[in-house]
C-alpha cells in the first residue's frame, strides 16, 4: 500500500480503461497520488454509503423496490456510481461517471485500511461491501454478468442435455424459481458446493455428490461468494501491512476514527460502574429493559438457569448497564444456586465464563454487549433457548400474548405486529419503547439494547445520573485524572489539522442522527 | 432406564485398567495420523483432558503413538476431547507469536443430543434415554448419513454413540477436514429443518416446492413414524399429546379434527384422518397444506446444534472415551447393525468383561469392545485406500523434480 509515496502518475486516458465498468472487484489498488483532503472526503462518504446499506438492509428486504430506490438516491447524493446508464450525460454540476468510479475505487481501499484490524470490523465491512456489490450487480445485463464470470476465472462446467433431462424433476423441485421451461431453455452448471454456500445454506438449489446445479440466471450467488472470499483474504493481507500505514501521522487519527464510527456507541467502555444495585434489577427489567432482555431476565428468574446463548446476550447487557464483575458473579451465582446448580459447580463451570465476559480470562478481550444487528442476525435460538430478538424470533401469537401480559394496549400491539410482519424488528422495538414509556415519537434510532436502557433511564429519570456520551469513544478524554500527560495530549490534539477536527465532528453528528 | 451397577466413584480404579487393557491405541493413532499424508498432522492435533475433580486441561498434543499412550496411562483422563489441527504444536502454543497460532483443519462433526427433543418425547426427559426414544437417534443417523453421502459426496463417516444421550458424526474426508467455518455452517443449515426455541409452537414450515432433500428425509421418517410416534410415544392417545399435535394443524381444519377424534380413539385411525384432511388441502394448494408432513418432521426429524458443527476449533468428545457419568464407552456404530444397536447392552457386557472379569482376559480381542474396534478397523481400511492414492500422487510429484 504505497500509493501515498509513489511518484508515478496515471495519465487521464488510463482512467477510462481502468474504470470501464460501473462495478469492479477491487483487485488492484489505486496507483496515483491523492491529496489528503480527497483521502478524507472519499473515506467518509463511502462510510456514509455503507452505513446506509446497513440500515436499509435491516429495514427492507434487500433488492426490493424501496431498498433500491433509497440506495439509488443515496448513491446519487454522495456521488457514487450505481448504474452504468444512470448519468452518462456530462452534467455541468457534479463529477462525471469516471470520476465517480475513481472515487469508488479509492474509497474502498482506504476503508480497507481502517476495517482490517479486528474480526468484528472485517465482518462488518465485508457484509456491507457484499450487499453494495449485490445491489450494483443487479443492474447488469446477462451479457455483462457473463463477462464477470470470465474475469473471475471460475471453473464451472455446463451439464449435458441428457443429464439435464434425467435430473429435470429434481431440478424443478429444488428451487421456486426453476420451472420445466427453465430447465429446457437454460444451461445448468455444476459447481462445487463450497463455491455456492448461500444457495446450499438456504437449500435453494439441487445438490448431488458435492456439486450444486445452478441455472445461468443464478450465477450471481456464485459471484458474491467469490467476492466475499477475495475481500476476506485481502483484508487479512492488509492487516499485515498496517504498521507501515500507521506510522504516517496524517493517516492514523482518521483511520482510527473511521473504524470506531461505524457503531457509534458500542458500550464496550463501562461507564457508571456500580451505580446500579442488584436489588434494582427486577424493577429495572420491567421499566427500562428492551423486550429481549426482559424476556431473558424473566426466564432466568423462573428457571434459575439460562443456556449459553442467553447467558452471553444477557450477561454482556448487564455489563453494559454498569454491573461490576463482583456484582455479576453474585447475581448469577445466587440465581443458579436456587436451581439445580450447587455453589461448587457454579464456581467451577459458570464463574469462569462470566470472568471471561469481563476480559479476565483466556484471550482477555473485553467482550462488547451485542448490538441489535448481532442479536437479530446471528445465533438464532433453538429448543430451550430464550435469547434472540423477540420481534424476530418469537411466534407472532406468542409475542402478542407476551405484550398483552406486559400490558401493552391492543392498538399498540397491532402496530407492533404490523412492523414485525414487515420485518422492521428494530422499529417494532422502538414502538414498544414508545408505548411503554408513554411518549409519542422517540428522537433516537434504536440499534443497541444498551442504548434502549440509557434512553429509557433518561426519559424516566430526567437524565441526571447517566450521562449520554457524545464524544468519540476512541481515546477517553474523560481521563482528566491523568494530569499533565493528558494536558499535553489535549494540546497536541488541538494543534492537529483544523480540517480533521471538522471532519470528525461532522462524522459524529451524522452517526448520532442516523 | 435400566439400572446399572456403575458407580462413578469407581472410575479412579476402572480407568487405569481401561487405558492399559482396552483402549485401542494403535487404531486411534492410525486414524488421527491419516496415513501420514500431511506433515505433523498428528503432532499438531489438540486434545483436551478432563481429569479427576473436574480439572480441565487444554492444548495437549503428542508426537508419537507411544507418547500418547504413556500420557493417557499416566493421567487417566475421565474424558477426552478432540480438537483441531493447528498451525503449531498445541502444547507449545504459548511460545508462538500471538495471532499466528491458528486452527487449520478438523473433521466436520455433528452432535445430536436427546435433550433437544424434550418437547416431543413423552417417555423421558433431560439426560434420560430409553429404547423408545432411541429410535429418534436411528432416524437421525439414517437421514443425515444419506444426505452427507449422497448430497454432499462425503464417504468416510464415523458415527459414534456419545456414551449417554446422543450420537456424534465425524466426517473424515479430506475435503471435509478442510472446510471453512462458513462452509460448515452452510452444511449444518442445509441439514436443519427444525427452527425455533421455547417461544415457537410450530417449528417446521414447508413451502412449495418441496426440496428433494426434504422428500428423502420424509421417506425415512415415514418408515418409523407409525411404530415410533403412534404406538410407542402414543402422540395421538393421551389428551395433552393430542392437543400438542393439533396445535400444529391449520385453524380451518382444527375443529373438524377435534370432532372426528371424539368418535375415533385408535391412534392409527386418528392419524389417517389427519392425512386425509391433508390430502384434501393439498388438492386446493392453499397455504399450510403440508401440515401432516410438518407434524412428522417436528416429532422425528434430527435436531442438530449448529454451533458444534460450525467451529473449526470446536472440541468434541473422542470416540472410545469413557462417559464419566454412565461408565459407557463412546463406541462407533456400525450402520449395518443400526436397527439392533442397543446402547444399554454396552454397559453390561463391556463392563462385565473388561473390569470385573478382566483377569480372565489379556487384551481387548476377547471383550465385547472387540467388535467395535473391528468395525473401526474396517472404517480405517476404507480411508487408507484414499491415503495410499494421495501418497503415491505426492511421491510422483516429487519425482518430477
Image: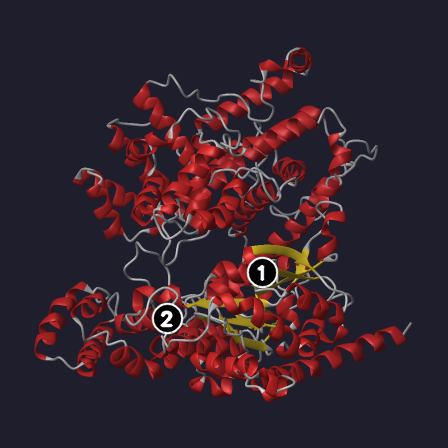
Q: Nearer the viewer, residue B376 or A184?
A: B376
**Badge 2 density bin: few <14, some 14–19, many ≥20, Cα 10 Å:** some
Residue that label 1 marks: B315
Q: CA gap, disc 1 to disc 2?
A: 37 Å
Q: Position of residue A1 (x, y in %)?
A: 76, 39
Q: Nearer the viewer, residue B228 or A335?
A: A335
Q: Residue A40's quadrant in the figure? A: top right
- Applied colour scheme: secondary structure
Against A49, is B137 above or below? below
**Quadrant of the snapshot with the C terminus of chain B:** bottom right
Count of numbered labels shown in the rendering: 2
Residue that label 2 marks: B209
Q: Position of residue A172 (x, y in %)?
A: 43, 74
| Chain assignment, label 2 | B
Label drawn at residue A448 = none
Q: Position of residue A118 (x, y in %)?
A: 63, 41
* Helix, strand or loop at mark 2: loop
Which residue is depicted at the point 32% across and 71% down?
B299
Q: Nearer the viewer, residue A182 or B215?
A: B215
- Outermost residue toward the right? B401
* Horizontal side of residue A165 vs B36, given as left or right: left
Amino acid at each position: 500500500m504505497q500509493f501515498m509515496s509513489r511518484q508515478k502518475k496515471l495519465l487521464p486516458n488510463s482512467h477510462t480503461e481502468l474504470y470501464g465498468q460501473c462495478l469492479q472487484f477491487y483487485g488492484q489498488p489505486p496507483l496515483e497520488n491523492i491529496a489528503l483532503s480527497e483521502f478524507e472526503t472519499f473515506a467518509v462518504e463511502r462510510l456514509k454509503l455503507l452505513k446506509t446499506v446497513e440500515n436499509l438492509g435491516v429495514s427492507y428486504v434487500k433488492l426490493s423496490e424501496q431498498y433500491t430506490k433509497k440506495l439509488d438516491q443515496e448513491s446519487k447524493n454522495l456521488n457514487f456510481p450505481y448504474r452504468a446508464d444512470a448519468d452518462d450525460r456530462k452534467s455541468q454540476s457534479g463529477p462525471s461517471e469516471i470520476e465517480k468510479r475513481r472515487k469508488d475505487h479509492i474509497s474502498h481501499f482506504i476503508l480497507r485500511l481502517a476495517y482490517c484490524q479486528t474480526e468484528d470490523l472485517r465482518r462488518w465491512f465485508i457484509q456491507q461491501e457484499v450487499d453494495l456489490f449485490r445491489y450494483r450487480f443487479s443492474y447488469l445485463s446477462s451479457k455483462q454478468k457473463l463477462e464477470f464470470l470470465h474475469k473471475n476465472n471460475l471453473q464451472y462446467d455446463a451439464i449435458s442435455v441428457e443429464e439435464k433431462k434425467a435430473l429435470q424433476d429434481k431440478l424443478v423441485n429444488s428451487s421456486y424459481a426453476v420451472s420445466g421451461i427453465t430447465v429446457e431453455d437454460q444451461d445448468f452448471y455444476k459447481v462445487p458446493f463450497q463455491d455456492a454456500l448461500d444457495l446450499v445454506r438456504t437449500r435453494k438449489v439441487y445438490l448431488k455428490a458435492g456439486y450444486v446445479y445452478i441455472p445461468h440466471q443464478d450465477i450471481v450467488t456464485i459471484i458474491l461468494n467469490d467476492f466475499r472470499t477475495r475481500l476476506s483474504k485481502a483484508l487479512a493481507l492488509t492487516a499485515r501491512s498496517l504498521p507501515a500505514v500507521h506510522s504516517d501521522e496524517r493517516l492514523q487519527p482518521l483511520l482510527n476514527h473511521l473504524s470506531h464510527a461505524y457503531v457509534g456507541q458500542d458500550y464496550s467502555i463501562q461507564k457508571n460502574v456500580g451505580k446500579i444495585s442488584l436489588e434494582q434489577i427486577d424493577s429495572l427489567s420491567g421499566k427500562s429493559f428492551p423486550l429481549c432482555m426482559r424476556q431473558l431476565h424473566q426466564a432466568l428468574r423462573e428457571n434459575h438457569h439460562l443456556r449459553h446463548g442467553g447467558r452471553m446476550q444477557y450477561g454482556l447487557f448487564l455489563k453494559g448497564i454498569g454491573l461490576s464483575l463482583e456484582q455479576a458473579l453474585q447475581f448469577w451465582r445466587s440465581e443458579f444456586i436456587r436451581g439445580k446448580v450447587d455453589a461448587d459447580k457454579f464456581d467451577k463451570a459458570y464463574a469462569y465464563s462470566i470472568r471471561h465476559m469481563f476480559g479476565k480470562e483466556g484471550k482477555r478481550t473485553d467482550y462488547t454487549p451485542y448490538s441489535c444487528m448481532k442479536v437479530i442476525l446471528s445465533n438464532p435460538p433453538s429448543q430451550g433457548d430464550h435469547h434472540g430478538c423477540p420481534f424476530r424470533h418469537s411466534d407472532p401469537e406468542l409475542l402478542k400474548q407476551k405484550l398483552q401480559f406486559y400490558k401493552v394496549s391492543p392498538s399498540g400491539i397491532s402496530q407492533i405486529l404490523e412492523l414485525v410482519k414487515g420485518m422492521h424488528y428494530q422499529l417494532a422495538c422502538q414502538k414498544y419503547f414508545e408505548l411503554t414509556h408513554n411518549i409519542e415519537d422517540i428522537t433516537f434510532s434504536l440499534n443497541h439494547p444498551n442504548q434502549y436502557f440509557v434512553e429509557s433511564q433518561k426519559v424516566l429519570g430526567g437524565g441526571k445520573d447517566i450521562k449520554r456520551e457524545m464524544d468519540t469513544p476512541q481515546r477517553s478524554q474523560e481521563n482528566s485524572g491523568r494530569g499533565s500527560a493528558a494536558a499535553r495530549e489535549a494540546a497536541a490534539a488541538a494543534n492537529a489539522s483544523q480540517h480533521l477536527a471538522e471532519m470528525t465532528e461532522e462524522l459524529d453528528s451524522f452517526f448520532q442522527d442516523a | 432406564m435400566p439400572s446399572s451397577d456403575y458407580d462413578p466413584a469407581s472410575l479412579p480404579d476402572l480407568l487405569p485398567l481401561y487405558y492399559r487393557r482396552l483402549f485401542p491405541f494403535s487404531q486411534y493413532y492410525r486414524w488421527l495420523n491419516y496415513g501420514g499424508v500431511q506433515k505433523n498432522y498428528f503432532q499438531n492435533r489438540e486434545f483436551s483432558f478432563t481429569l479427576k475433580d473436574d480439572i480441565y486441561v487444554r492444548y495437549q498434543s503428542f508426537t508419537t503413538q507411544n507418547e500418547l499412550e504413556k500420557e493417557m496411562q499416566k493421567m487417566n483422563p475421565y474424558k477426552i476431547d478432540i480438537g483441531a489441527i493447528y498451525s503449531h504444536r498445541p502444547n507449545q502454543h504459548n511460545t508462538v507469536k500471538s495471532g499466528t497460532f491458528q486452527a487449520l483443519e478438523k473433521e466436520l462433526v455433528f452432535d445430536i443430543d436427546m435433550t433437544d427433543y424434550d418437547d416431543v418425547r413423552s417417555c423421558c426427559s433431560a439426560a434420560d434415554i430409553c429404547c423408545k426414544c432411541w429410535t429418534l437417534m436411528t432416524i437421525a443417523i439414517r437421514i443425515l448419513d444419506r444426505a452427507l453421502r449422497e448430497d454432499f459426496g462425503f464417504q468416510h463417516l464415523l458415527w459414534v454413540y456419545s456414551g449417554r444421550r446422543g450420537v456424534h458424526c465425524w466426517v473424515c474426508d479430506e475435503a471435509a477436514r478442510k472446510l471453512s467455518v462458513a462452509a460448515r455452517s452452510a452444511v449444518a443449515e442445509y441439514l436443519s429443518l427444525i427452527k425455533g426455541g421455547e417461544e415457537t409452537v410450530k417449528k417446521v414450515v414447508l413451502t412449495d416446492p418441496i426440496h428433494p432433500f426434504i422428500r428423502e428425509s420424509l421417506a425415512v421418517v415415514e418408515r418409523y413414524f407409525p411404530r415410533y410416534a403412534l404406538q410407542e410415544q402414543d402422540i395421538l392417545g393421551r389428551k395433552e399429546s393430542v392437543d400438542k399435535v393439533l396445535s400444529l394443524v391449520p385453524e380451518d381444519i382444527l375443529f373438524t379434527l377435534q370432532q372426528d377424534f371424539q368418535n375415533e380413539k385408535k391412534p392409527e385411525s386418528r392419524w389417517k384422518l389427519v392425512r386425509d384432511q391433508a390430502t384434501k388441502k393439498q388438492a386446493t394448494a392453499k397455504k399450510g397444506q403440508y401440515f401432516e408432513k410438518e407434524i412428522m418432521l417436528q416429532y422425528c426429524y434430527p435436531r442438530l446444534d449448529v454451533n458444534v458443527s460450525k467451529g473449526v476449533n470446536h472440541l468434541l468428545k473422542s470416540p472410545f472415551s469413557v462417559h464419566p457419568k454412565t461408565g459407557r464407552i463412546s463406541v462407533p456404530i456400525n450402520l449395518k447393525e443400526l436397527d439392533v444397536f442397543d446402547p444399554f447392552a454396552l454397559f453390561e457386557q463391556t463392563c462385565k468383561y473388561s473390569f470385573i472379569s478382566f483377569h480372565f482376559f489379556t487384551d481387548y480381542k476377547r471383550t465385547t469392545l472387540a467388535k467395535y474396534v473391528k468395525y473401526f478397523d474396517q472404517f480405517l481400511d476404507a480411508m487408507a485406500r484414499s491415503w495410499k492414492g494421495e501418497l503415491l500422487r505426492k511421491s510422483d510429484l516429487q519425482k518430477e523434480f
